[in-house]
Image: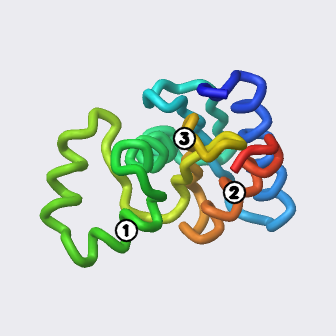
């Protein structure tokens, strides 16, 4: 498989929201992008604040742009803030250096997209993203 399908992306969104509700998180927003950074699926729970779509997208897009999770980007930002600030300005969707943006890989380990979740703490956002990916049977 070389791409993420709409069905898989919708399953990721649903799985992330299901996990968020099970954990009692604040309302989340979930963006799923293909490997080229194009939006495949998005959902914003009732009560999610108005900047959440852009934040979720930037978490996922940043992961794709740098090839690592947004958690790792956050760690990089501590060590190399100038680099991350510059990279964020170069990436059309931005980069959010906080957990919640996770690369999506197929069974062969190829990156086929990324998911970004925002709305609660970054650690909880990442848990929801990982649950969504698992629900779709992806890595």
Q: CA distance from mark 1 to mark 3?
A: 20 Å
Question: Could you tell whether 7 is left or right of 94 in the image?
Answer: right
Query: Looking at the image, is mark 2 or mark 3 earlier in the sequence?
Result: 3
Q: CA distance from mark 2 to mark 3?
A: 15 Å
Q: Quadrant of residue 98?
A: bottom left
Residue found at x 66% / y 53%: 129
Disc 3 on helix, strand or loop? strand
Say which quadrant the N terminus sits in. top right
Q: Residue 5's mark?
A: none
Q: Nearer the viewer, mark 1 or mark 3?
A: 3
Residue 57 appears in the rendering? yes
User: Residue at the bottom extreme?
Assistant: 79
Question: Could you tell whether 130 is left or right of 50 in the image?
Answer: right
Q: Residue 130's mark?
A: 2
Residue found at x 44% / y 30%: 37
> Residue beneath label 1, please?
74
Query: Looking at the image, is mark 2 or mark 1 earlier in the sequence?
Result: 1
Q: Residue 111's mark?
A: 3
Instruction: Determine contact: label 2, label 3, CB under 8 Å.
Output: no
Question: How many circles with numbers are drawn on the protein?
Answer: 3
Q: Position of residue 126 (x, y in %)?
A: 61, 62
Considering depth in this image, is 27 or 17 the residue closer to the camera?
A: 17
Residue found at x 46% / y 66%: 71
């Amino acid at each position: 498989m070389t791409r993420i399908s709409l069905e898989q992306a919708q399953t990721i969104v649903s799985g992330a929201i299901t996990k968020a509700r099970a954990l009692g998180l604040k309302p989340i927003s979930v963006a799923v992008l293909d490997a080229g950074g194009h939006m495949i699926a998005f959902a914003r729970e009732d009560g999610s604040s108005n900047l959440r779509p852009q934040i979720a997208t930037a978490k996922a897009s940043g992961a794709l742009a740098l090839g690592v999770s947004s958690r790792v980007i956050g760690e990089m930002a501590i060590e190399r803030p100038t680099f991350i600030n510059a990279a964020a300005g170069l990436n059309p969707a931005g980069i959010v250096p906080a957990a919640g943006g996770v690369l999506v890989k197929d069974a062969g380990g190829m990156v086929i997209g990324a998911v970004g979740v925002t709305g609660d703490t970054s650690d909880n956002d990442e848990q929801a993203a990982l649950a969504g990916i698992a629900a779709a049977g992806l890595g």
